[in-house]
Image (cartoon, rainbow, N blue to C red):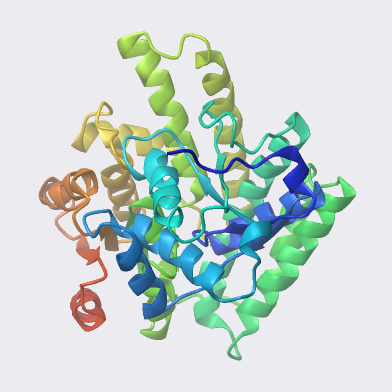
Amino acid sequence: MSYPVFTKEMKKDYTILIPDMLPIHFTLFSDIFNQYGYHTELLHLTGNEVKEAGLRYVNNDACYPALLVVGQFIVALKSGRYDPKKTALIISQTGGGCRASNYIFLIRKALAPIYPDVPVLSMNFSGFEKESAMKFTPVELLKLTVASCYGDFLMALYDQTKPYEKTPGQADALLKEGLSLIERSIHKGTYVWRRHYYKKLLKIFSAIKIPEERKPRVGIVGEIYVKYSPLANNHLADFLVKEGCEVEEPPLMEFLLYCAKNAVNDHERYGLNKKTVLFWKFGYHLMMEELTKQHHYLKHGGYIAGSSFKEIEKNATRIINQGVKMGEGWLIPAEMLSLTEHGTKNIVCCQPFGCLPNHIVGKGMMRPLRELCPDVNLTAIDYDPSTSFVNQENRIKLLLANIKK
């Protein structure tokens, strides 16, 4: 079956819909796309309607993230807000063995019977979908990379100030102000002066004073879509804040470093990536420097910085082999161990129900993790259309009850 292809001529007139995984980061990405002549919109659709649409148009054996992404697209197209003959969709492809590469085919197959004219674009840096891939110039690629850095920094500031806001919505207003600042810097071309803007963002969020005695910290780890997407995890971060906790979400930079490290490992172990290994090593070095810089500014601003990625790598070897890289692989247990040893001893591990790789590296690693850290307080939560929210909430409340004890 042939599928419609997004051509250069479509760029001017088409609206491109983006699924919502990382709300802060994807807001910045969308703004960058629009700056270069695209017209993109970030979807914020939630609720049972999205899940039901996904179940109707995707085989129920498909993983939960795939189902939600398809559901968001279908609901948006059926809303009447978009002309199907002037609308395209975009999805990322990282080159992984499951969701990360194959969503695009599920989306096309789901759309074919009802919206055969809607093309699906791929956002990837691995040479996939050459006819339907969004092309980036070096400057555009730099802007997207820097936007990821600012997204991580904003996410850390927001997570650490939200529980201590004086009036409801104060942290959200500061986040909006911070996003506007970074968007303006990207438009003006001053975005590269990250030290300058990190200081400005710290000043913006200083409006919320963090007390010396902080609330219990709860780390959120797991499959990349479910741990970040409010739609997928039933607004887990908001729920934890309402229950009197402070949330810690690992930065996207850690996942990108994990991908770069895997590419280097594949070259050293199996002789793969001969043409690109220097690129991955260079990217790894730059991202390591950036994460170190962010930690420096967070600490000097009175915030808690995460673990260095070198430490996360070492922790991986203590609990699992770095050859385990299907799904989020060795990153999940390594992040859990690093969180625990840095004082965040309460952890929620989010997993799509039926995702075997992430159950192995998530729930499967809990016993060795408890042997290394007997005082860790953690729970694994499965996310699926058929899973009761009340059941998920009760599991999380058991975790919180152990904090109080």
For this orientation, the residue located farthest to the right is 188
Label total for image: 0
182 w.r.t. 48: above or below: above
Residue drawn at the location 43% of the way across and 51% of the way down: 107
Specify whether 204 is left or right of 184. left
Q: Residue at x 21, y 73 (%)?
A: 399
In the image, is 299 to the left or to the right of 71? right
Q: Give x and y (percent) for residue 210.
A: 56, 75
Quadrant the C terminus occupies:
bottom left
Regarding residue 301, the answer to whether it shows in the image is no
Q: Position of residue 50 (x, y in %)?
A: 41, 72
Q: Is 32 in front, or is 11?
A: 11
- Between 91 and 177, the residue placed more toward the observer is 91
Q: Is residue 112 left or right of residue 34?
A: left
Is residue 368 among what the camera can see?
yes
Horizontal and vertical percent position of residue 228: 44, 60
Q: Quadrant of residue 230?
A: bottom left
State which quadrant residue 65 falls in: bottom left
Residue 142 at x, y percent in the picture: 71, 36
Q: Nearer the viewer, residue 299 or 180?
A: 180
Q: Give the residue at x 47% y 9%.
A: 274
* Vertical relation: 337 (above or below) 60: above
Residue drawn where x is 36% and y is 18% of the image: 266
393 versus 3 height, above or below: below
128 or 208: nearer the viewer: 128
Residue closest to the far bottom: 167
- The image quadrant where one finds the N terminus is top left
Image quarter for residue 48? Answer: bottom left
Q: Relative to 260, does residue 164 appear above or below in the rendering?
A: below
